Image (cartoon, helix red, strand yellow):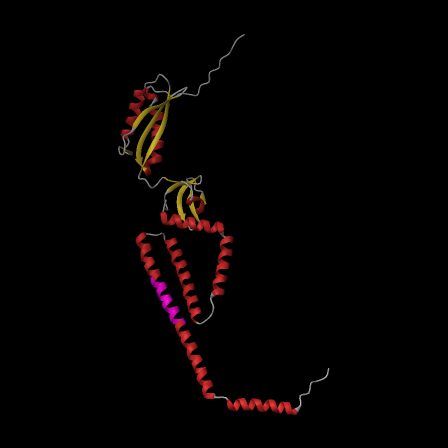
Amino acid sequence: MEQLIVPDSIQKAHLANVVTKITQTDYQQLVNDLLSQAMWIGLKILLALAIFFVGKWITNWIIRVLNRAFERKNVDLSLRNFLRSMIKVVMMILVILAAIQTLGINTTSFLAIFASAGLAVGMALSGTLQNFAGGVILLLLRPYRVGDYITAQGQSGTVKNIGLFSTQLSTPDNRIIYVPNSSISTSIVDNYSQPTTRRIDWNVSITYGDDVDTAREAILAMLNADKRVLHEPAEPMVVVAELSSSAVILKVRAWSANDDYWTLFWDINEKIYKELPAKGIHFPYPKLDVNIKQN
């Protein structure tokens, strides 16, 4: 490969040109330009720092205001912490983007990246986000609280915890059930703990021919003798509800405090079984009539 040889005359001419440019340079103007640029960049940096610290102060002030509002509204602690953190993160991202924009950096690409990432995460976690939205609705509207006995989605139990994604129920036989919040927030929920009183219903079957008045007086005497039976919003009652094929069915109704519901129900059941036969009242047995034809 042949080496390119530059004549000495050309080299000398180039060197002379460089020397001429150096000698003709206005160093004072160059220094002034550099100082001007440095001052402008410094001002931008100071403005960006000012935007950052002022934005941070405003964010903390808003968080304090929200904290006081959450306390006045008695918002659930887990929801309070989550909303506070989410609002703070979103506002700090906006403050940082504003500071970067002040430095002359184009933030459009950052916004595009955040939007794409948010869309991808939202599609990947669609079910989880639905549960989260349901949890937020439940914590805000409070259709039930921790300690309430509820029935939802075919499951019954005492509410042990209301999370952002699921509700934890403890069943009477000590099983723990986690029900997704998205299904609870869009379904019917029976809350047995919110009312302070409940009505108890009994169905008592007696045989045909027994004295209904005697049975009624005996059952009402049991109910009125029990201090757990309330006389408001209605007095205890016994009515003939149905005449079935093999029994007269009495409908018994009484009111009690919510906490006494099951104990009163079971105790009156036992008393009806023990005391009605002593009054001459009989309980029917299932009967089957068989007709035999003889040829």
Q: Nearer the viewer, residue 113 or 258?
A: 113
Stretch in magenta: 48-61
Q: Farthest residue toward the top? A: 295
- Expressed as whole percent of the image width and height from the top left, the position of residue 42 reads 42, 77
Q: Nearer the viewer, residue 166 or 18?
A: 18
Q: Which residue is painted at 43% across and 81% down in the image?
A: 36
Q: Which residue is painted at 32% across and 20% down in the image?
A: 212
- Expressed as whole percent of the image width and height from the top left, the position of residue 252 reads 33, 27
Q: Main secondary structure of the magenta part?
A: helix
In magenta stretch: residue 53 = yes
Locate the N terminus and report the quarter of the image it occupies: bottom right
Locate the C terminus and report the quarter of the image it occupies: top right
Q: Farthest residue toward the right? A: 1
In magenta stretch: residue 129 = no
Quadrant of res 43: bottom left
- Expressed as whole percent of the image width and height from the top left, the position of residue 123 reads 51, 53
Q: Is residue 253 above or below residue 102?
A: above
Q: Is residue 147 above or below residue 34?
A: above
